[in-house]
Amino acid sequence: MGLFARNRPVCPHCGRRIYNIPSAREILGKLAGLRFNFAFNLIILAVISIAAGIVSLMLGATVYGMPMFWSYFSSPALLLLNLLPPLLLVMLMHFIFGRAWIAFAFPSAIILTLSVGAFFKFQVRSEPLFASDIGHFREASSVASSYALTMNWKVTLAAALLILGSVFSFFILKHKPKSLRLRVIVSLAILAASASLYSFVYSSKPIYDRLAADIMDVEWSAARKYISTGFMYPFIHSASESRPRRPSSYNRNEARQFLESYGNPGIPEDRRVNIICLMLEAYADFSVFGVLDFTEDVYGPLHELQSEAISGSLITNVFGGGTIDTERLFLTGNTYLTNYRSPTNSYVYYLRSQSYHTEGLHAGDIWFYDRRPINASLGFDEYYFMEDFENGSRDDSFFFPTVRELYDARDASRPYFSFNLSYQNHGAYESAFTKEPYFIERGGVSDEAFNILNNYLSGIYDTTLRLAQFIDSLRSDPEPVIVVAFGDHMPWMGAGDFVYAELGINVDAGTDEGFYNYYSTPYVIWANGSAKELLGNDFTGDGESFSTCFLLGEVFRLCSWAGEGYMQALREFGDTVDIIGTTGGVFRENGALTMELSEQAKAAYWRLKMIEYYRMKNFMY
């Protein structure tokens, strides 16, 4: 008989049924029995795993806060795609290990740690956490230590849920699946279902784009698209973006024929010049916005260089960080970042095949973004880092003279290609104080914003002077030299981009103006007199704006070099479509930003992607 049986005795005095209220011992006894109940354990595990998924969504909303979090509930499909991963992972662990506390603790620790990491990454970079970031945990920890991270009740909630859920599971959920056959069958079924979901749903770009657009206006902005779709779903989706993307209807032989149709002409020996590339950390020209009252001509030397060179705007894929995206797309011509851990076709290898000596310098550490092994995979003969110098420094006072020393020490019997990355001006910029001189008028912005701006401009002023001095030192060099200088991305200016907001600079990448403000950095292609004479080009004038992948190809064009077959195909496509952004699949066709190419451009783009994928999968040097 149950605790509340229906057949109760009737009171002889009033005629009402008599209900025996169960004692606390009886209740606890029933609950104790449920601890070993299969269904009860699964239901509770499902509930707390879904709770972990919901907390993950709260953190995934980042600066958009609770309004964004509640918006996820307006789309049942979106909610399901975010809550399924923790649910499936917890159930898989339960049937593999047979312990409820293990099933909850380990998957939840992974999911909530990633969610907290994403929460803090957006504070630092205004950028979501991508699956490809997992391989750069050490770099992320190093960078994060220089930023002031703001704690939040959501982080505390995540920690509390992890601890309490694990303790509850350990002491209360005692059922252990005993049938080995059942455990194997269920585990395999979960794995098969997960693989199918990833292949047909989580990696699907059309589904991802449609669900993102249902929540908010995400045009031009990969960050907004990511955040508008939650956390676990877009994080898993991003894994499909980190490997070479096989084009639809890919045919290896057809792709090879496309590539071979361009030929692979070399660089004429009588037209070879030395090339020095300088990628400058967070280098941007704030004078173009017309919102700052400068007390010093911070960008004067830059503007003088631009007047005697080819200069324009580089449209990067990143903002406030992500240097390797700009760096590696420049060196390879690839339209997106992928894996470079094995020998990789690149413009560096092409130049090396043309007898160029290829080397470079990064004013940072060897391990950062695995540059030493990856740069070797990209074709550099030598690459130098701070560890290679007894008195190395991250400052430009070391960077520019060392680049010059490497140039002077080269084997002058061979043409020379040098690619160098600075570190000075890396964020974060001190917000609590700043020192004189003041490069802008105080007023119109908060003290915190003023301090960030002035500290940033102080470093930029020094960089600009040293860049001009470096180029001056090459003017009378009898050897032909071309210098390519450009910024890797716009600077990060505080959580929520508040400095840009106080200045009234539109960095809303969902608008045309904001898109260009958000992703543009200056580039300069300068040639000394010997190079101009040798190539018959004065190297002056207004350059175009285009994506990073086109920049080195533009240098080749100015030198009247055809370049390898892929570069020719990319240049041909760039005549019509000169922005190929990973920022939500943005293109610029015939001068207009679009997310939908014309039918003619789609066909040309498919052909280019066929060639690009073939080049990624088949090393040629």
Image: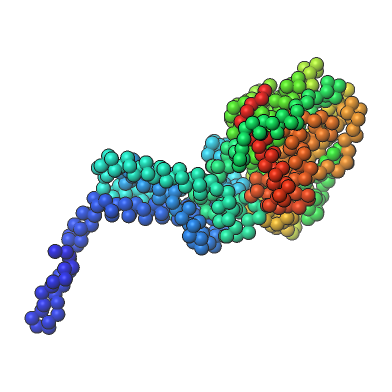
Numbered-mark total: 0
Q: Quadrant of residue 505?
A: bottom right
Instruction: Give the quadrant of the C terminus.
Output: top right
At a point 44% along the width and 48% down the height, the residue shown is 85
At a point 74% along the width and 31% down the height, the residue shown is 261
At a point 31% along the width and 42% down the height, the residue shown is 183
Instruction: Give the quadrant of the N terminus.
Output: bottom left
Q: Position of residue 192 (x, y in %)?
A: 41, 43
Q: As rendered, which of 40 and 455 lies closer to the eye?
A: 40
At a point 91% along the width and 30% down the height, the residue shown is 536
Q: Quadrant of residue 609?
A: top right
Is 78 placed left or right of 23 in the picture?
Answer: right
Residue 18 versus residue 514 in the image, above or below: below
Q: Position of residue 121 (x, y in %)?
A: 57, 46
Is 570 placed left or right of 147 in the picture?
Answer: right
Q: Quadrant of residue 404?
A: top right
Q: Coloured how?
A: rainbow
Of all residues, the one furthest to the bottom in this rendering is 14
Q: As rendered, which of 298 and 382 lies closer to the eye?
A: 382
Residue 539 makes an appearance in the image: yes
Is 568 placed left or right of 203 in the picture?
Answer: right
Q: Position of residue 332 (x, y in %)?
A: 69, 33
Residue 248 versus residue 381 in the image, above or below: below
Residue 165 versus residue 330 in the image, above or below: below
Residue 465 makes an appearance in the image: no
